[in-house]
Amino acid sequence: MSKIKKIGVLTSGGDAPGMNAAIRAVTRTAIFNNMEVVGIRHGYHGMIYKHFTHLKVYSVSDVLAKGGTILKTARSQEFMTAEGRKQAYDNLKEEGIDAVVVIGGDGSLTGARVFCDEYYDIPFIGIPGTIDNDIYGTDYTIGYDTAQNTVVEAVDKIRDTASSHNRLFFIEVMGRDAGFIALKTGIACGAEAILIPEVEGQVENLQNFLEKGNKRKKSSNIIIVAEGEKSGGAFAIAEKVKEDFKEYSVRVSILGHIQRGGAPSAFDRVSASTLGYEAVQALLDDQKSVMVGFHNGEIDLVPFRKVIKIKKKVDPAQLEMADVLSI
Ligand code: F6P
């Protein structure tokens, strides 16, 4: 019998499609194993202000297919302070919560790590949830697949109008300071160029990309720009191109928060369900301060320490491939 009787579950940071599937899986797996479940609303903010709600099996009915997070989310500045974390700890103790599952991105898992370094007697397990896929220790994060599909659908539509007008489009996608969304969607949409923060000097090289397209008299050029790209974003790059290459009819599209919404894909639903289930199994196995991730299709438990410290890398070979395929 596990000594854990009551667990808390929260979502934190940017929401991601599939978070509800993970909440559902955590809740039902915990109840199946005779634990009580407390939903902590509004992420760490709710931990500090006791936004606690008891979750039953039926509380998570009909949420599997919904985007967003039924527990709401937030980025808590107060949890970054020692006083905030002390208050959160006292509240967890008062509520009798003896373990927590955190679903979120880099910042959320960093918060979990700092908390666990200060307070040892409440184990935390992390689930990677962010559309950015920028978390070390897992091949993919909850929401990444759905966000990619959303981007691909939007870019395909933009391609139709771009070709009709012989236009050059700069399309900015999310990803914070990482280029995973840009790289994969650029390949999926046959982008003429993909500009990501991990690679320097790409903007200086734009002329080559454009000449490549010109040679074949392409009817459209799509350049995917990751929002973290370091030359000032899609608008700034487009302005420069307009000045230097007057022959192009240039347009910019910032896809924005549409990338975070929508029903999760089948892939995200299955991944999130698996991660939620495995997070509770990890608690039953007396694990703590680890994130549940996927490595080569298998479940892997990765210490928070590593998740936080190591930067996940994009595969430069894929950028080369995209370049070849778009000649
Ligand atoms: O981390 C998810 C993400 O959507 C990033 O891609 C983006 O940079 C950021 O969150 C946007 O945050 P906000 O919704 O607070 O503007």
Image: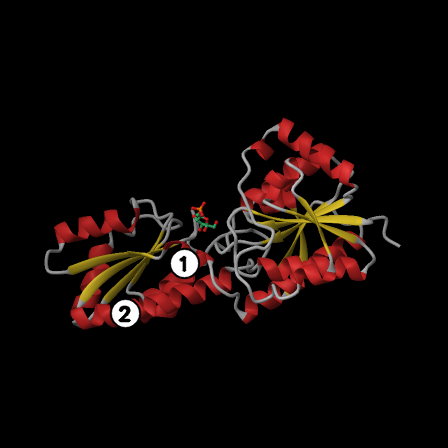
The residue positioned 54% from the left and 51% from the top of the image is 135
The residue positioned 20% from the left and 56% from the top of the image is 207
The residue positioned 73% from the left and 61% from the top of the image is 57
Q: Which element type, helix, strand or loop, lies under badge 2? A: helix
Residue 13 percent coordinates (x, y): 53, 46
Going by the numbered disc 2, the residue's amino acid type is Arg
Residue 226 percent coordinates (x, y): 36, 53
Q: Quadrant of residue 18?
A: bottom right
Is residue 13 or residue 249 the one in the foreground? 13
The residue positioned 74% from the left and 44% from the top of the image is 123
Q: Quadrant of the C terminus?
A: bottom left
Q: Quadrant of the N terminus?
A: bottom right
Residue 258, disc: 1
Q: Dot 2 surroundings within 10 Å: few (below 14), some, or many (20 or more)?
A: many
Residue 140, disc: none
How far, Cα to Cα, is label 2 from label 1? 18 Å
Residue 312 percent coordinates (x, y): 52, 51
Residue receiving disc 2: 159
Is residue 6 or residue 237 the one in the foreground? 6
Going by the numbered disc 1, the residue's amino acid type is Ile
From this view, report whether residue 44 is shown above or below residue 167: above
Drawn side of residue 265 relative to residue 228, left or right: right
Residue 29 percent coordinates (x, y): 75, 61
Q: Which badge, 2 or 1, is on the more N-terminal residue?
A: 2
